[in-house]
């Protein structure tokens, strides 16, 4: 089955990983801007990173027939430095019209601090001004519920934000309903150690249905498994889910969300005809 991984950090992965993902049916992916494994000390560090996300990774992915998309921001982990964050936010418009950019993300909270919240709101302002989609990172473990509530409050306090143009990622059992009930898209991140497993993701799909729900691997600097989405496909098949429902979660849904971006172009390999 063809699938899309809507949240994977390929800058931290090898070229062999691209090949493995292609063999497993991955035809497109989106890579949110995030932490690069170390804190950057200047806006130029981010400028180079944005070039990597808009030039280098799409070319690396294309070698294996994978369409690579991306999101731009300064992540919550580095947003404690408000001055640097403002410089990065001011630089984003230089890259926003690159053909593989889907919007602003992954913005959000990490430790739920005041500075993180300030930078989050300033990113929202930019997204509204540029009419861009928004991808949101929610904090991990014990900070998750509080952080998710804070994020949803900030989003809902701004009437200019259209919920169907926002995806809130890394939801778990105790946050998914808050996100879906408020009209946002939700993403489940499947990790081998923290966040959720393919089994827990399948349970949540059975409870909440398939509408506005996406799954991803996050594949990043920590212990993570870039092939987690195929693991979910196998888990859902084992449980007897219809192929159309599996496809909706791993393929149709992320593409429907992305398609709200005016630059988004996707070549569907399953409908392409031979010349
Ligand atoms: Zn991420």
Image: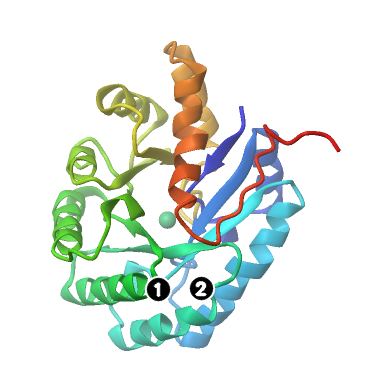
Q: Earlier in the sequence, mark 1 or mark 2?
A: 2
Task: Tell me the residue that label 2 is attached to.
Answer: 96
Q: Nearer the viewer, residue 182 or 225?
A: 182
Q: Mark 1 falls on what kind of element?
A: helix
Residue 63 % position (x, y): 77, 52
Q: Quadrant of residue 226?
A: top right
For label 1, being within 8 Å of ligand 1 is answered no
Q: On residue 130, which mark appears?
A: 1
Q: Nearer the viewer, residue 11 or 62?
A: 62
Q: Quadrant of residue 21?
A: top right
Above or below, 50 against 161 in this view is below
Above or below, 109 against 125 in this view is above
The residue at 51%/41% (across/down) is 225
Q: Is 201 situated left or right of 100 in this image?
A: left
Residue 39 % position (x, y): 43, 76
The residue at 49%/50% (across/down) is 259
């Amino acid at each position: 089955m063809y699938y899309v991984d809507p949240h994977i950090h390929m800058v931290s992965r090898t070229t062999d990983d691209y090949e493995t993902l292609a063999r497993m049916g991955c035809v497109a992916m989106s890579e949110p801007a995030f932490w690069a494994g170390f804190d950057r000390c200047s806006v130029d560090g981010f400028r180079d990173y944005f070039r990597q996300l808009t030039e280098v990774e799409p070319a690396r992915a294309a070698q294996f027939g994978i369409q690579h998309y991306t999101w731009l921001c300064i992540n919550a982990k580095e947003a404690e430095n408000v001055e640097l964050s403002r410089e990065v936010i001011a630089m984003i418009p230089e890259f926003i019209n690159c053909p593989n950019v889907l919007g602003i993300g992954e913005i959000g909270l990490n430790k739920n601090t005041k500075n993180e919240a300030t930078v989050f709101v300033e990113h929202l302002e930019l997204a509204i001004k540029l009419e861009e989609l928004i991808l949101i990172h929610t904090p991990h473990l014990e900070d998750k519920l509080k952080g998710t509530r804070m994020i949803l409050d900030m989003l809902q306090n701004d009437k200019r934000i259209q919920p169907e143009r926002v995806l809130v990622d890394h939801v778990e059992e105790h946050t998914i309903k808050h996100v879906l009930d408020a009209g946002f898209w939700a993403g489940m991140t499947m990790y081998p150690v923290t966040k959720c497993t393919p089994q827990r993701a399948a349970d949540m799909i059975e409870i909440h249905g398939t509408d506005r729900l996406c799954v991803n691997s996050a594949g990043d600097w920590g212990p993570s498994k870039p092939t987690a989405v195929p693991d979910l496909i196998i888990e859902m098949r084992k449980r007897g889910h219809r192929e159309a429902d599996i496809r909706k979660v791993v393929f149709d849904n992320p593409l429907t969300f992305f398609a709200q971006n005016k630059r988004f172009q996707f070549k569907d390999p399953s409908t392409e005809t031979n010349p």
